Image (cartoon, rainbow, N blue to C red):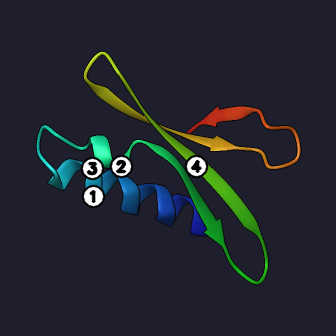
């Protein structure tokens, strides 16, 4: 649930930035008492994508 909220929050920030959201590209770390997570924000062909990264395997999953 928290990962979905984090993804929605990042998407909302990107949507509110207009055309230039390059400052949000990269890796974002979520850390809490119960778990840790990493989300990658990438830009491809003018679109932004959020990918959840498994901290154990390093593989990316689309959100």
Give the labeled residue for mark 4.
Answer: 39
**In front: label 2 or label 1:** 2
- Residue 4 at x, y = what percent? 53, 59
The answer to the question of whether label 4 and label 2 lie on touching residues, with beta carbons closer than 8 A, is: no
Give the labeled residue for mark 1.
Answer: 13
SS assignment at label 2: helix
The answer to the question of whether label 3 and label 1 lie on touching residues, with beta carbons closer than 8 A, is: yes
Give the labeled residue for mark 2.
Answer: 24
SS assignment at label 3: helix
**Disc 1 to disc 4, C-alpha distance:** 14 Å
Q: Identify the residue shown where x is 69% and y is 59%.
A: 37
Does label 4 or label 2 sit earlier along the sequence? Answer: 2
Q: Is residue 49 left or right of residue 3?
A: left
Q: Identify the residue shown where x is 76% and y is 32%.
A: 59
Does label 2 or label 1 sit earlier along the sequence? Answer: 1
User: How many marks on residues?
Assistant: 4
Q: Is residue 55 left or right of residue 45?
A: right
Give the labeled residue for mark 3.
Answer: 14
Does label 4 or label 3 sit earlier along the sequence? Answer: 3
The answer to the question of whether label 1 and label 4 lie on touching residues, with beta carbons closer than 8 A, is: no
Give the crowd class for mark 4: few <14, some 14-19, many >=20 residues within 10 Å.
many
**Disc 4 to disc 3, C-alpha distance:** 14 Å
Q: Quadrant of residue 16?
A: bottom left
Give the crowd class for mark 2: few <14, some 14-19, many >=20 residues within 10 Å.
some
Does label 2 or label 3 sit earlier along the sequence? Answer: 3
Give the crowd class for mark 1: few <14, some 14-19, many >=20 residues within 10 Å.
few
User: Please, is residue 48 above or below residue 4 in the view?
Assistant: above
**Disc 4 to disc 2, C-alpha distance:** 11 Å
């Amino acid at each position: 649930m928290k990962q979905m909220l984090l993804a929605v929050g990042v998407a909302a920030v990107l949507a509110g930035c207009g055309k230039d959201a390059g400052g949000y590209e990269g890796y974002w770390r979520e850390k809490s008492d119960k778990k840790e997570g990493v989300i990658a924000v990438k830009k491809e062909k003018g679109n932004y994508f959020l990918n959840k990264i498994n901290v154990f395997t390093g593989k990316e999953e689309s959100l």
